Image (cartoon, rainbow, N blue to C red):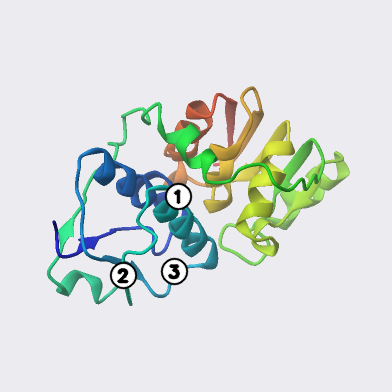
Amino acid sequence: MKDLIWISHGYDEWFHCLIQSIPNLKVAKDNGIDFHGITFPCDASPKMIDIFNRATKKLGWENRPILYLPHNEMRYIPRDEIVWRPSKDESLPEWLVPWLNSLYPETIDINMGESIFLSRNGYKRDNPEIERIVRHCGLGVVNLSDWDVEDQVSIIRNAKHIVGLHGSGLANLIFARPNTKVLEIIPDKEHRMYLFARLAWAAGCYYCREELY
């Protein structure tokens, strides 16, 4: 049995939490790795803590002691690191989407409309002009940070058309229904990677993008 396992990444981005940190727990379980304790960043967001708690419970590890540390201190402690991560060109594994969705059974129903725009109001890459246009087109504007993670999952599952600027809100596409239509708006060359396209494709969504540069 390992003394301590270190869950890397996920402390600053919901995207990395969903496709690396939380799946690493399942990878450890599937490979017969057991351990006495888990490190987890104490400055993680509430939604990251929520999905971490759900994952450890599902895997039967809810009683393992958790060592909460600032993420800048986690690198200095002895640990066994799980380093599974898909490469930039690798498709996400088939088990990832159904397993993450199984952490959020459909116990609530919050519907913000079939066509929604994921607002970045108050965050980097916010674009008030685009938000004004989508409101005029009749899309419901949703700021996911106003909702807890279970509500966010329900909002995404109930949408049939999702538009969003490149940003962490689009990481929730992994909870979208198959055949949901997704439009990602790319604001500049720095963010032209296909991170969220891979999530949309893995979830069975139709994906397209509009590049503004």
For mark 3, what is the residue? 44
Of tags 1 and 2, the one toward the viewer is 2
Q: Nearer the viewer, residue 50 or 72?
A: 50
Of tags 3 and 1, the one toward the viewer is 3
Q: Is residue 8 above or below residue 205?
A: below
Q: Position of residue 169 (x, y in %)?
A: 58, 51
For mark 1, what is the residue? 15
Q: Position of residue 153 (x, y in %)?
A: 63, 46
Q: Nearer the viewer, residue 105 or 83?
A: 105
Instruction: Find numbered disc 2 in the image and state the secondary structure of the residue it sits on.
Output: loop
Q: Earlier along the polypeptide chain: callout 2 or callout 3? A: 3
Q: Position of residue 200 (x, y in %)?
A: 53, 32
Q: Residues within 10 Å of mark 2 (few under 14, many from 20)?
A: few
For mark 2, what is the residue? 65
Q: Nearer the viewer, residue 7 or 136?
A: 7
| Image quarter hosting the N terminus | bottom left
- Residue at the spot x=70%, y=63% of the render? 146
Q: Quadrant of residue 42?
A: bottom left
**Amino acid of disc 2:** Pro
Q: Is residue 49 left or right of residue 80?
A: right
Q: Residues within 10 Å of mark 3 (few under 14, many from 20)?
A: many
**Amino acid of disc 1:** Phe
| Image quarter hosting the C terminus | top right
Instruction: Find numbered disc 1 in the image and state the secondary structure of the residue it sits on.
Output: helix
- Residue at the spot x=72%, y=32% of the render? 161
